[in-house]
Amino acid sequence: MPIDHNLVISSLIEIVGAKHVLSAAEDMATTLTDWRGDYHGYAIAVVKPASTAEVSAILQLADKMNIAVIPQGGNTSLCGGATPNQDDNNLVLSTERLNQIRDIDVAGQNITVESGCILDVIKSTADDHDLLFPLDLGARGTCRIGGNLSTNAGGLNVIRYGNMRDLTLGLEVVLMGGKVINLLSSLKKDNTGYDLKNLFIGAEGTLGIITAATLKLFPRPKASATAFAGLRDIDAGIALLNQCQAASGGNVIAFELMPKSIIENVLDFYPDCQPPLKDVPPFSALIEIASTADADSNPDADGTMPLVALLTQTLANAFEDGLISDATIAQHQAQRDALWAIRELTPESEIKAGKAYKSDISIPLRHMAAFYETTTKAVHAIVPNTRIFGFGHIGDGNLHFNLCEPKGGNGDFRRHYPDFDAIMLDILKQYDGSISAEHGIGQKKRDMLRSVKDPAALDVMQMIKQALDPKNLMNPGKVI
Ligand SMILES: Cc1cc2nc3c(=O)[nH]c(=O)nc-3n(C[C@H](O)[C@H](O)[C@H](O)COP(=O)(O)OP(=O)(O)OC[C@H]3O[C@@H](n4cnc5c(N)ncnc54)[C@H](O)[C@@H]3O)c2cc1C
């Protein structure tokens, strides 16, 4: 039976009020397109509930009227996860107004927040209490914690603190039909049956709507040291990473790989950025170590802060060992910001560079160099001069191995994407890697998932989906 759109809209207005239901095309435009502009969808309306009870009422209505619900936080998904398809029964549920910090437990070091809280707001709230919420990524000012949870987001500090799964103690979730599951525990130990919380983390909105979460907090680092080092090659970078971990007692909080192509591209489009080193080496690492000990408590005789001295010594040793060719260490905050700017401007400068095939792969560190070399060769055999923008969180074995059309353009570069998919799948299989490290599956990698996931595991995923969302109304067309 066709869906009566006017009835849907008036019923939603009864739940949240007219101000919080958008249905005009121009009001919904940004919601119906993804961050990269690759996906475009249709929705009857965008609804903005402000409480768990309102979310529950909306999902009750959706179940009754067979309306598909697409949860959306900051809409920064890089795989079309929060963009509806073109069906005429879609409703986007924006978590924008679910934005309260419910509680902060300073002694227990945890915080309970609603799922529409912007990541940066949670970080600064923790900071106000001299604590740290460590999840950090380029979209921190826009993405919302429900989106971070639903993608099991990673980012810059996973190497030290883990991803969203590691950072989450409890959840509150609403299922299609309106049932509210309260898993909002702050306990670190709670062996009372199946771990339902981890079912919803990383489910990309296909099993229910996360309305709130209890998250771990940590002591706030009081000192940090940041360096940019020119690497001999990728294996040298991994050796350097392990040396930095050993020297700092496991306190490497970020270790990012940047190839020459990326640094040159950032400098091309952002000429105000300073090249970190005199010559741009084939690969560089941006390294940060941090300590929660008071920065001023133990300065060396010459006044140098211990952490900076420690990183300087580690890099000097690496230079002696032939692992690095050059390095610079930030001496003050402005220098640190300048080093990080190169990394932070990478996604935007990539967009400016032209058409690019994007990936988010994970690979055992010992195969990273072989993966990089083999894939580069295979890609160049298809489109010579493709710019290989393979950068990212190498400390976690995670690279955004992106392929940018040759300088000057390549008219039909997108035609080669299926070939690039095949290359990636083949080489990742060879090296025990994964097609999705932190961005999720969304609609972009849904079909790929079928060819990489163990069929028995896929069957179990289907059974879970069927049990929780038998009518396939929760974010249809994503993941499975
Ligand atoms: C510049 C830039 C840098 C980035 N860097 C990183 C990075 O380093 N690491 C990383 O992991 N990601 C990164 N991302 C990707 C993106 O920011 C993350 O995936 C983020 O976690 C998504 O949050 P969001 O609020 O924007 O979610 P959205 O895009 O709105 O949604 C993402 C998915 O979660 C679902 N969802 C959203 N809210 C809920 C909810 N309350 N309940 C159930 N499902 C929900 C959506 O349906 C969708 O499937 C980056 C993106 C950009 C643009």
Image: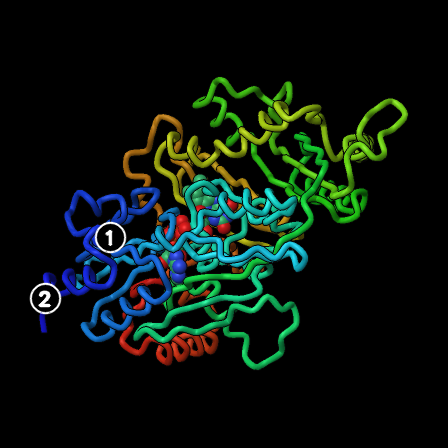
- Answer with the quarter of the image where residue 322 lies: top right
Q: Specify the quadrant that holds the N terminus.
A: bottom left
Protein image colouring? rainbow
Q: Relative to 442, is 192 on the left or the right?
A: right
Which residue is found at the position 43% from the left and 57% from the top? 115
Tell which of 428 and 306 is nearer to you.
306
Q: Mark on residue 20?
A: 1
Tell which of 188 and 148 is nearer to you.
188
Q: Is residue 359 above or below residue 210?
A: above
Which residue is found at the position 21% from the left and 47% from the top? 28
Q: Secondary structure at mark 2?
A: loop
Q: Is residue 114 above or below residue 289?
A: below
Residue 152 x, y percent position in the rendering? 50, 58
Which residue is found at the position 68% from the left and 40% from the top? 237
Residue 369 x, y percent position in the rendering? 62, 45
Q: Secondary structure at mark 1?
A: helix
Q: Earlier in the sequence, mark 1 or mark 2?
A: 2
Q: Is residue 278 above or below residue 239?
A: above
Q: Mark on residue 192?
A: none
Looking at the rendered structure, the kind of residue marked 2 is Asp
Q: Do tag 1 and tag 2 residues touch (Cβ < 8 Å)?
A: no
Which residue is found at the position 37% from the left and 65% from the top? 52
Mark 1 C-beta closer than 8 Å to ligand 1: no
List the residue tagged with mark 2. 4
- Answer with the quarter of the image where residue 404 lies: top left
Q: Nearer the viewer, mark 1 or mark 2?
A: 1
Looking at the rendered structure, the kind of residue marked 1 is His
Residue extending furthest toward the right: 301
Q: Relative to 354, is 243 on the left or the right?
A: right
Residue 432 x, y percent position in the rendering? 57, 61
